[in-house]
Image (tube, grey):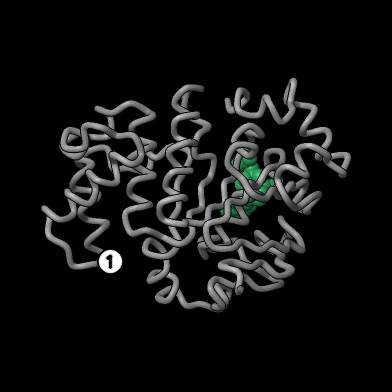
């Protein structure tokens, strides 16, 4: 089976300076990869590269990023734009901040949907409300009429996840999707994202500092340090028996980490 996403010896530079080096990873349909590592190790850079959003300073200088057999590195902006949204979507740490503060959630969702498909306002609302229910937003009609500031952080984050999932992407890139949330809401959002994966077979890359989130969500883990892969493989194996000294250090920084307790440390 061809991988949904494959990074093949990828090196990424900002202003000519390498930030991540020689990254290899593979993600199959419906699989979840957790990317962990200290601040500045290059986690977000990897997912930005997959989206072709490294900006003017950033560049993939070596290697290839294959998405369903097409090399993202060689794609024109126009080609990339057709992928982003319907195929590859992204969730940020603080979705509320990414929304326009002076327009209702409903207006913003309708606008983003219309960019990719011909859809009536009514159909858009119905689809959105259905997706909102799946991500734990019960009163969808009120949410659609609301401005982002009228919603809680957890609600805004669910709105962000809802927007990214509306077109049923094959790949969801989530940069710290739960870290701005309180412990209880974090746990709910993690569970809701797992339900979305189950329903839509969406593969996900979750960038996080939270080993609990990785233990609960990820099938595979990639541990980064200073832009280099320290460890990569099956989540259970890596969390239960880390081989690399840096990974051991990361695990030790989480008190009482063991299989039975992963769920209880699904916190910030
Ligand atoms: N646009 C940019 N221009 C120049 N350097 C950048 C740019 N974006 C990121 N960097 C640098 O690349 C390195 C990796 O940053 P990145 O955001 O990928 O790390 P991270 O592991 O996601 O960190 P954090 O956990 O703090 O979010 C850092 O040294 C950062 O300063």
**Foreground pick, 172 / 90:** 172
**Mark 1 near ligand 1 (CB under 8 Å)?**
no
Percent across and percent down for residue 248 are: 83, 35
Q: In the picture, residue 211 is in which quadrant?
A: top right
Percent across and percent down for residue 76 are: 47, 77
Left or right of residue 234: residue 177:
left
Which residue: 51% across, 77% down? Answer: 75
Number of dots carrying numbers: 1
Q: In the picture, residue 159 is in which quadrant?
A: top left
Q: In the picture, residue 115 is in which quadrant?
A: bottom left
Which residue: 55% across, 72% down? Answer: 72
Q: Residues within 10 Å of mark 1 (few under 14, many from 20)?
A: some
Mark 1 lies on a secondary structure that is: helix
Residue 55 visible here: no
Percent across and percent down for residue 151 are: 28, 28
Q: Which residue is mark 1?
A: 116
Left or right of residue 84: residue 118:
left
Which residue: 32% across, 54% down? Answer: 166
The N terminus, quarter of image: bottom right
Residue 53 position (above or below residue 218): below
The C terminus, quarter of image: top right
């Amino acid at each position: 089976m061809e991988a949904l996403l494959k990074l093949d010896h990828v090196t990424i530079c900002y202003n000519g300076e390498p930030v991540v080096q020689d990254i290899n990873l593979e993600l199959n349909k419906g699989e979840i990869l957790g990317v962990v590592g200290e601040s500045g190790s290059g986690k977000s850079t990897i997912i930005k590269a997959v989206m072709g959003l490294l900006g003017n300073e950033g560049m993939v200088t070596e290697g290839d990023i294959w998405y369903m057999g097409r090399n993202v590195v060689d794609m024109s902006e126009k080609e990339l734009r057709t992928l982003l949204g319907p195929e590859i979507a992204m969730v940020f740490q603080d979705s509320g901040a990414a929304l326009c503060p002076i327009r209702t959630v409903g207006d913003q969702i309708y606008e983003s949907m219309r960019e990719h498909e011909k859809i009536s306002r009514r159909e858009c609302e119905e689809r959105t409300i259905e997706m909102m229910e799946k991500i734990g937003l019960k009163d969808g009609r009120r949410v659609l009429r609301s401005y982002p500031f009228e919603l809680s952080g957890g609600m805004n984050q669910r709105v962000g996840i809802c927007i990214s999932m509306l077109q049923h992407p094959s790949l969801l890139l989530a940069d710290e999707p739960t870290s701005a949330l309180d412990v209880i809401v974090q746990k709910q959002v993690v569970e809701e994202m797992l339900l979305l994966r189950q329903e839509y077979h969406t593969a996900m890359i979750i960038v996080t500092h939270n080993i609990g989130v990785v233990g609960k969500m990820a099938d595979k883990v990639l541990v980064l340090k200073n832009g280099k892969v320290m460890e990569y493989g099956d989540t259970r194996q890596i969390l239960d028996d880390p081989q690399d000294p840096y990974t051991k250090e990361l695990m030790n920084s989480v008190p009482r980490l063991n299989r039975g307790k992963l769920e209880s440390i699904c916190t910030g």
